[in-house]
Image (spheres, coloured by chain):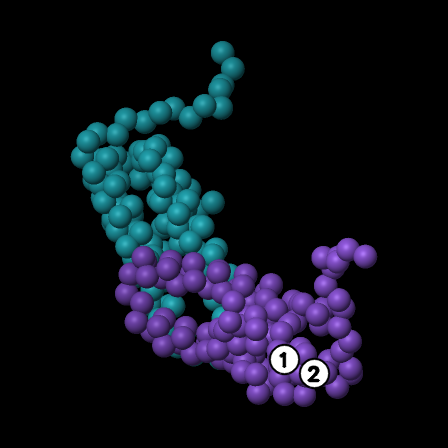
Chain colours: A purple, B cyan
Amino acid sequence: MPQTNHPVEQQWSSAEQEIARQACDRAREREMTALLTYVRETAGAIASMETLWKLHDFLSARRHDLDSKYAEDQYDAMIFLFARLIKEGWLSLEDLAGLEASKLTKISALTRL
Amino acid sequence: MPQTNHPVEQQWSSAEQEIARQACDRAREREMTALLTYVRETAGAIASMETLWKLHDFLSARRHDLDSKYAEDQYDAMIFLFARLIKEGWLSLEDLAGLEASKLTKISALTRL
């Protein structure tokens, strides 16, 4: 039989689903807190329209990014999201403790790509 | 002869053109200064993503508004722009001193619409 290109769907126990959801919530919370802190700290010093529109462009990009990033509701796709969040610094592998070793290995491998 | 709906084009002396341009620049400067002050004062207190995205929506609207508002380069159309700027508080009739009385009368009448 030829190999197919379809990824094998993984099983996610209800405990793992809960860990995944909590990790997502935690990463989003951290990312949003960092964004709010950044805006509070930088906006107070804005002195020109050029800087104001740069902040506006930055917020447009962050909003679009945040809206799409955390919209994922397929657990298998979360493997990629977790790798991205770890690379970006919003999650660590410790936040995912409790997931199957095979999933953690995949996530870890993806962070090194 | 039936009346046409075309407005009669007015003559703008070079002195009037200069007054109009300076008034536009002054209004834009005032409006931008007020916007920068508002953002500096409010952004420092943003504590939730909801408030942040409200500020983002507000900036999107202001940016669009400012870009289109001051793009006018037809002097006759500036009569309407000046009336709007007076109504919004960015100009006063004193800023337009030196324009022909007929133009000031039109602008003044438009501010009362």
Mark 2 falls on what kind of element?
loop
* Pointer 1 residue: A104
Question: Do tags 1 and 2 sit on the same chain?
Answer: yes
Which residue appears at 57% of the width and 73% of the height?
A109
Crowdedness of circle 2 by 10 Å Cα count: few (<14), some, many (20+)? few
Q: What is the count of numbered marks?
A: 2
Q: A106 or B47: nearer the eye?
A: A106
Identify the residue at the far front of this view. A1
* B52 vs B85: above or below: below
Q: Please provide percent x and percent y for residue B47.
A: 49, 79
User: Which amino acid type is shown beneath numbered disc 1?
Assistant: Leu
Q: Please provide percent x and percent y for residue A27.
A: 56, 79
Q: A89 or A10: nearer the eye?
A: A10
Image quadrant occupied by the N terminus of chain A: bottom right
* Pointer 2 residue: A100
* B112 vs A107: above or below: above
**Residue A106 horizontal side relative to residue A65, left or right:** right
Which residue appears at 32% of the width and 27% of the height?
B10
Crowdedness of circle 1 by 10 Å Cα count: few (<14), some, many (20+)? some
Q: Please provide percent x and percent y for residue A91.
A: 54, 80
**Residue A65 horizontal side relative to residue B8, left or right:** right
**Residue A101 horizontal side relative to residue B94, left or right:** right
Q: B77 or B55: nearer the eye?
A: B55
